[in-house]
Amino acid sequence: MARKSSPARAPADGGLPSKEQILEFLNSAPGKAGKREIARAFGVSGGAKIALKRLLAEMTDEGALSGDKKHLREKGKLPPVTTLEVTGRDDDGDLLAKPLQWEESDGKRPVVRVVATRDGRDAEIGIGDHILARLQKLPRGSGQASYEATPIKKLPREKRRLLGIFRAAKRGGGTIEPIDRKELKSWPILPDDMGSAEDGDLVRFQLNRRGRFATPRAEIVESLGNPDDQRKISLIAIHAHGIPEDFPESVLQECETLPPPTMDRRTDLRNVPLLTIDPIDARDHDDAVHAEPDTDPKNSGGFIVTVAIADVAHYIRPGSKLDREAQLRGNSVYFPDRVVPMLPEKISNDLCSLRELEERPCLAVRMIFDKHGEKRKHTFLRAMMKSAAKLSYQEAQAAIDGKPSDKCQPLMERALLPLWAAYRAVAKARENRGPLDLDLPERRIVLDEEGKVARVVTPERLEAHRLIEEFMIQANVAAAETLEEKRLPLVYRVHDQPSPEKLKGLRDFLETLDMKIPHAGALKPEAFNRVLEQAKDLPVPDLISEVILRSQSQAEYNPKNIGHFGLNLVRYAHFTSPIRRYADLIVHRALIRALSLGPDGLTDDEIPRLASVAKAISDTERRAMSAERETTDRLIAAHLADRIGVTFTARIAGVTRSGLFVRLKDTGADGYIPISSLGNDYYHHVEAAHALIGARSGEGYRLGDTVEVRLLEAIPSAGALRFEMLTEPSPGNFGSGKTLRRNTGGKRKFGKFRRQRR
């Protein structure tokens, strides 16, 4: 708020403040200040206000002031508190920002350096973020920055940055075609606003309004290169979501001065034949496993399982530049053509990668299971290990299936067979626990040497995948249990049960198939599993799985525990991937502190910020998921761009009021069919049945239906595909007429509908 106190200084002659006094007041005002605030501050009243208005107009004409009567400031200067957009970094890794509000007549926007805060608020601020900050003018010769900013708070982030493809005009300027498929409008660009952009470039732009009632005008802020090369197509998502890509030089320099690990307070596991089992193309290896029979006669038939995880906390110390960068990124982001890592390659692919036959520091958990797979106890160790072998899932599975490679043969008795025996015991306990059994296939894009899509494959789900997954889950549970027992705050991985609204929608849908989930009592994953089991006898089991998946809540990080519904666990935390998830690094530090395993544990300064950090890394996780999904869509759209007019087999993957989303069988590509193109009938969206149903014929299209479609349009930059429906609507199982009338407001009669019972 502007000052409301008594006059700031005695007015000059004529009862008016001097020009110098006005500038001094505007530069020290803590908020917006205009003519009203100046008059109040200097006690100007009555007829003198007219003279003040003339004085302010004179100062504006002289170039001393800019703005309007409600928001005046010294020309070319920023107020002491303002909103900034973080735009980049300097050579030292410090964030640089520019003011969001700036008059073009004042010249170039000044550069502001964002300084570190004692409470670590700046660690959650990244490029593209908007912040409210307190400014201090820097003396001349301070480098490229004119001001220094201390963050007050981070403002809600724009969901997406404005990106588009620049199309140059022959006479200068051009237009911007937005990459967001929801944005239909193209923006004209004047020659003065196109910067260094060339035809076909991906550009970041902003919309400027020259006057209160003027139409916004686009201005290119940054040219990001030509995205037509499929090898660079992931850059669109990286820039659209503001994902930090390159590491600052100061962060990379810190990698060169990291302390080597010693055996101090470490258990020696170098002779234990721990194995890394990963995807065949994995570049980093952050977990290793080992199992052996328990020789304790009180645990006959039991097993001792060791899960060793790279000791990232040894290298990434709280408050370091590496730590701030890791927290800012939150997680690694995986694209078909590249990885944007959370940690520099020196750490993720070298110092903390559990390479075959090389010594590496680790944080390990030793778990004892009985013959039924129930965990009896566990112990955490800070250790030094040496991986006995690096195996792929396929290689390990082949060995167990009786076809061991030369590498696996000597490991069978001492490592692989005991590991599988332990897993089969633990798998029984998992089955008894009854987690949600949604095993949907995941497609993977394979690129050729030129970075183009060669094919889309669905990797086989092997027992080796389930083995590693289950042992990682057990290790994660052990971490949460230990920290709760030691009463140390932690960041849980929580997953709430479905919301009442989503459950109602699911129940309505299942009723159309004569299936149901219980209304009364505490809902458990086994209720969904019973439905999934029944669905195996139906023609559309994938449809049921898809609808159940959509009914689920989204998992997140939170210092408050509500359990993990999907895994049916009371407590759960992420411990097993600190190379690629900041949440796991927090848990490692908490364990080190709780168990007195070293001086590099969770600090007192970190504990009060756990809630805000959990929120931030949940957001970066969602950002990564969106960016990965969008890049896949763009790559496949580019792959199909030369197949316009080709017919494909597809499955209806989404039903909305405006049309159908379809997923191609061969590639998994998603596309859209507008409702206006669905023939001569008038279609209603029946939400409960996940269907579009013709008012005249009573026939329709339903989620999960297999259909034939023709590709009409492909826009690679937007990842958009548009199809034409070739399959006639079906009179299938849409539910009762009563249900349909209820979901369409009862405005139209639908005639008779079949209700096909099993």
Image: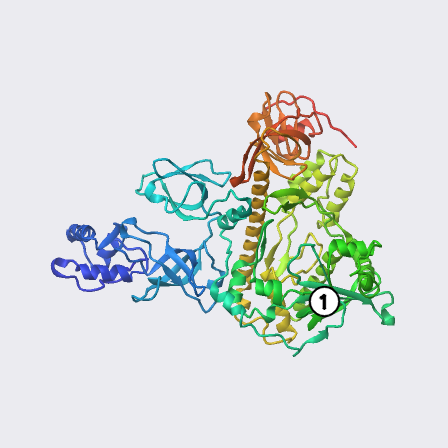
- State which quadrant residue 579 falls in: bottom right
Point out the image quarter for the N terminus.
bottom left
- The residue that appears at 50% across and 44% down in the rendered structure is 227
- State which quadrant residue 298 falls in: bottom right
Query: Between 16 and 291, which is closer to the camera in this rendering?
Result: 291
Residue 472 sits above or below residue 731 on the image: below
- The residue that appears at 41% across and 43% down in the rendered structure is 198
Q: Amino acid at mark 1?
A: Ser
Residue 131 sits above or below residue 721 on the image: below
Q: Position of residue 249 (x, y in %)?
A: 47, 64
- State which quadrant residue 164 falls in: top left
Q: Position of residue 665 (x, y in %)?
A: 68, 36
Asked if residue 133 lies left or right of residue 183, the reply is: left
For label 1, the SS is loop
Residue 607 sits above or below residue 553 on the image: below
Residue located beneath label 1 in the image: 387
- The residue that appears at 87% across and 67% down in the rendered structure is 300
Q: Position of residue 430 (x, y in %)?
A: 77, 56
Residue furthest front as drawn: 449
Query: Between 358 and 473, which is closer to the camera in this rendering?
Result: 358
Q: Position of residue 279 (x, y in %)?
A: 69, 54
